[in-house]
Image (cartoon, helix red, strand yellow):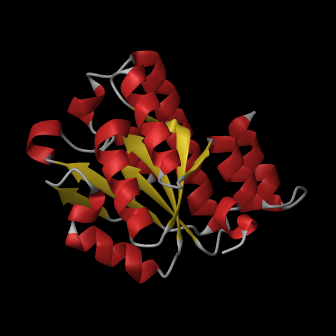
Amino acid sequence: MSIKESFFLDRDKAVLVVIDVQEKLCVAMDDAVLSKLVKNIGILLESAAELNVPVLVTEQYVKGLGATLPELKEKASSAPCYEKMAFSSCGSAEFVAALKSTGRSQVIITGMETHVCVLQTVIELREAGFVVHVVKDAVMSRSKQNWRTAIEAMTLAWAVPTCTESVLFQLLRVAGTDEFKKLSKLVR
């Protein structure tokens, strides 16, 4: 695989995954960081819808942690949602089947908590041969130290650290299109 194939997202090869951004889990998070996370995941969900990038959502133990935040659920209304008990999203056979059925090889990862469910998902996706991009400003943990440690571990596992704007502009590729005019407003 070339460097470009590893580091450049392609809208025809990518799928966006939102991991466990759930109501009761969000209560334990820093409000300022959570606000940025929700904004950035919202931007990625709107971009995915516009660019026909498939979206998959997971929820960890809904009975205890609640559902996905309503504002994100609304933006991902057509995306399938997979409840899981395993920390890794790959612990859900339904999630894995849905991901494989997309035929996509690049996975854009967002969600929480970075050092638990996100980290375990990323490692299993890398093991399965996927190119994984971890959106650093769209993943979070209760502790900044846990977030940093997980980002470092995922990078060592050859996941590509990235940010919301990089993802958006890699998927767009060029300026001047109607898509660019519409989506670039999301990050101004």
Residue 28 in the image: x percent, y percent? Answer: 26, 22
Residue extending furthest front? 156
Q: In percent of the image, x 49 and y 38: which residue is there?
A: 152
In the image shown, does 47 or 150 lie closer to the viewer?
A: 150
Rendered-image quadrant of the N terminus? bottom right
Q: Residue at x 82, y 60 (%)?
A: 178
Residue 78 in view in this figure? no
Q: Nearer the viewer, residue 29 or 115?
A: 115
Residue 7 seen from this side: yes
Q: Is residue 13 left or right of residue 166?
A: left
Looking at this rendering, what residue extends furthest in the right direction? 176
Q: Is residue 121 left or right of residue 102?
A: left
Which residue is more in the foreground, 28 or 179? 28
Q: Quadrant of residue 106?
A: bottom right
Residue 176 lies in quadrant = bottom right
Residue 163, compared with residue 147, is above or below; it is below
Q: Quadrant of the C terminus?
A: top right
As drawn, 106 above or below 151: below
Across and down, in percent, residue 26 comes to: 30, 29
Residue at 31% x, 72% y: name it.
96
Task: Please provide percent x and percent y for residue 182.
Answer: 75, 51
73 with respect to 9 (left or right): left
Query: Which residue is at a point 50% across and 39% down the rendered structure image?
Result: 138
Q: How many discs appear?
A: 0
